[in-house]
Image: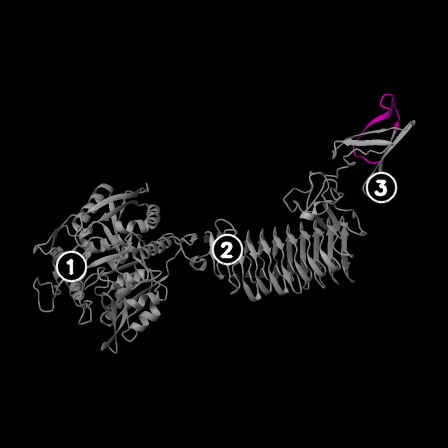
Amino acid sequence: MKKLILLILIIISCSLFARYKDVPVTRDLDPNAEYDTYQDWFSSHPQQLTQFREVSRVFSNQRDEGFLIVVNNNLYEDIEQSIQIYQEDLTNDNFDSFVLEYNGTSHEDLREQIITYVQTENVTNVVLIGDLPVAWFELFEDWNNNGIQDEGEAWVEFPCDLYFADIDGIWEDTDANNIYDYHEGDKHPEIGIGRIVADNMNMLPDSESELINDYFQKNHLFRTGIVTSYETSLAYIDDDWSYWGQEYQQAMQLAYPSVVLVNNIEATNAGDYRDNRLIADYEFIQVHVHSGPNAHYFYYNNGNSYALVNNYEIPSVNPTAHYYNLFACSNSRFTTANNMGAMYIYGSDHGLVTLGSTKTGSMLWFEDFYEPFGVGTTIGEALRLWWEVSVDVGNDWRWQRSWFYGMIIQGDPSLLRQYEQGEVIYIPQDFSTIQQGIDAASDGFTVFVDDGIYPENLTINGKDIILQSINGAENCIIDGFSDDSVVIIQESDDSEIRGFTIQNGIANYGGGGININGSPLVEECIIQNNSATRGGGIYVVGSPIINNNIIQNNTVTVAGGGIISYGGEIQVRNNLISGNHSDVYGGGVHIETSGVVEIINNRISANSSQRGGAICFHAENAGGLIKNNLVIENVAEYFHSDFGYLTGNHELINNTFANNVIDSLGIGFGSQCNAVLINNIIWENADEEIKIYPETNVEVLYCDVQGGWEGEGNIDVIPRFVGQSYGNYNITGFSHCVGAGIEEIEINGTLYYAPEFDIEGTIRPAPVGSNPDIGAYEHLNGEPFVSAENTQLLIPDYKLQNYPNPFNPATTISFSVTQNSDFVTLEIYNIKGQKVKIFDCINYVDAKAMKSLHHIIWNGTDEN
């Protein structure tokens, strides 16, 4: 029975080998192709003594695996920052990392250094960066495995990185030509190894260091999950291998469940591969095609003709795949300038790793590579595991060497199949433009933007991300350069934009600064010098929150110089809205939505329009919660605040409307408009401070209205602002608005409340237990100071002063009279001329001073 099983295994093994021997080898179809040789490499690399030094080591303290980074010493300074970031990424993957700066041409010395780190630091992966020593190997391609060089079996020499990965094998150069031709002992690799070589990519415009820095940038983005993996991969199998297409597809599916197979001989061609497949967002492309170092040769016309995909075409195509398995003759011959394996990496914004061969041949038994790669091993380790079971095993080792000895990794061997999705993108570190960062981001990402001026017109479409400057709006400017809206936000309800200057946008219709269709948060921005037909600063369809911004000097021809809202329920909070202009409606804010909007805690000043210089409502059933706003110095022909016809229910509570310049009428309420005005200062705006049209229900209560207004708690007293000439509209402690408001009141069955805090965040009422003040600002006293003038009144008949002044709760009034009388009466009046207190005193005359002296303590109460 055992003999039978053994016989079956031998038969299966032989049949598999026979089947793979039938697989056509990849070849260069150019009959005039000439490959670079060891002598070519040697002549361009004059012998140099070996010099090296370790320049960095970083420990992860997570696992006992090391990663060695060997960098050409002439290159290191220019890519040092990228290497530091790379080490951080390796640390996050739990690798200890060691950076060795290396100079010299001896591959033996380089191998000795690798062996030292493997033995002392448990290095399991090595990456060779820049122009570093190359080991060459030579053999005849024994395709029939008979040990004899038959006709058509060429003698070839090629770069062989197995020399550095197999640290305990025996390598000899038996014919003393500096090219190895003998490899025995333990012939399998002990470590993963990759090369990052760009010094010979002269078809690309960037320098070697620029190409490598760009490589590590996209490597970092991929590792951190900022650039995410695509869902689908591609097996593109040209004519000679189409028979095995499904087998190759199934092997790839061990790592990538979704693999598109293209293997119909009438479908595979150069045009389809170049123009359709390379740009189709495949994560991993495995292409089977006859090739040379610099081109693919795709058959067409039933295999009678072929067309090329050339290396110089790759940059203009800009393929999107991250990984490539190039079943393509000599595509990875990294010593050849502009080789395809490198071009897929450095000629693309996306390429990270290519697997391929430096000679004729490629990978077979793909499942032995994809299976470990699919379960979380690095790509370098997956190739090493494949090598253990595929190369130098059994009696077919000559055939295996002919196929596989040129296999290498170009790129980072420590990369995994995929990484957890990242959450942070930095501009310009990760991407040079903000839009690139937005495009790379997914829901939940934060895109941080460093200081600078960014000439861009941005679009956030269907993504819920945070776009935020690092150092605030003064330092981070997005300039539309009069080209379009500076920022367009579409269907991104949970997005946030924070901390930018957004300027110089022009929109033919809406939103020169920001055009919003959705409900994002716009916060801590300076939105200035933009123009449009509607919504010079911000145009809104939706329910965004516009919070703590400066919206200034924007213009429109129709409505909403600062902000316009169409549809939804916008919240406008804590903003400075100043210096905006509309030719017709709403210089500051224009509302044309049937929803209820909130305009709270804003300073709306120096805006202008024909109608509604500060605020304008012009939509049926539009309602507003207008609270804690300072509305000052706006200019209009009609109304500084216009609540137009047929609008809905409005609550105007604890606002200060003052010193607006209006040709006629102040606050207007159109027909069939309902409004309550509570705790507002309405002063020095127009001859008619409040205009109410017929069929309008407006209640004005506990307001200070110039010229007076009938209603509970209303007063008509100068508000006594601290310094309105220089923009300070806080009320003084002497203002009769202090404590003259009401905290809550029921009107027609509805309770209305004063805001819990004032425009500056002071608790209302202050102190707790008192009545709130009238206006946007809350004074810390619960009632006004009572004061005599803090001077001595030098009149021939009497002299008076008080201390302290101001006072709370009491003051001492001292006075004297020089005329003799039995009694003196002291009467105290308020600023309206109303008598509030009377003191009758017995007059006592000091004989020496020839005057009477009196001291009265008054606690501020009136006669009641």
Judged left or right of residue 605, residue 201 is left
Q: Position of residue 216 (x, y in %)?
A: 33, 54
For the residues labelled 3 and 2, the Cα–Cα distance comes to 57 Å
- According to the image, what is the colour scheme of the structure? one colour
Q: Where is residue 103 in the image (x, y as percent from the top left)?
A: 22, 49
Helix, strand or loop at label 2? It is: strand
**Residue drawn where x is 66% and y is 45% of the image:** 758
The numbered mark, 3 or 1, whose residue comes first in the sequence reads 1
Find disc 3 in the rendering and name its residue.
Answer: 834
For the residues labelled 3 and 1, the Cα–Cα distance comes to 110 Å
The numbered mark, 2 or 1, whose residue comes first in the sequence reads 1
Please state which of the two labelled residues, at mark 3 or mark 2, is closer to the viewer.
2
Amino acid tagged 3: Gln
Helix, strand or loop at label 1? It is: helix
Do the CB atoms of the residues marked 3 and 1 lie less than 8 Å apart?
no
- Residue stretch in magenta: 841-864
Judged left or right of residue 821, residue 316 is left
Task: Kindly identify which numbered label has been placed on residue 38.
Answer: 1
Q: Quadrant of residue 314?
A: bottom left
Find disc 2 in the rendering and name its residue.
Answer: 477
Q: Where is residue 40 in the image (x, y as percent from the top left)?
A: 17, 60
Q: Position of residue 463 (x, y in %)?
A: 48, 59
Circle 1 crowding by C-alpha within 10 Å: few under 14, some 14–19, many from 20: many
Do the CB atoms of the residues marked 2 and 1 lie less than 8 Å apart?
no
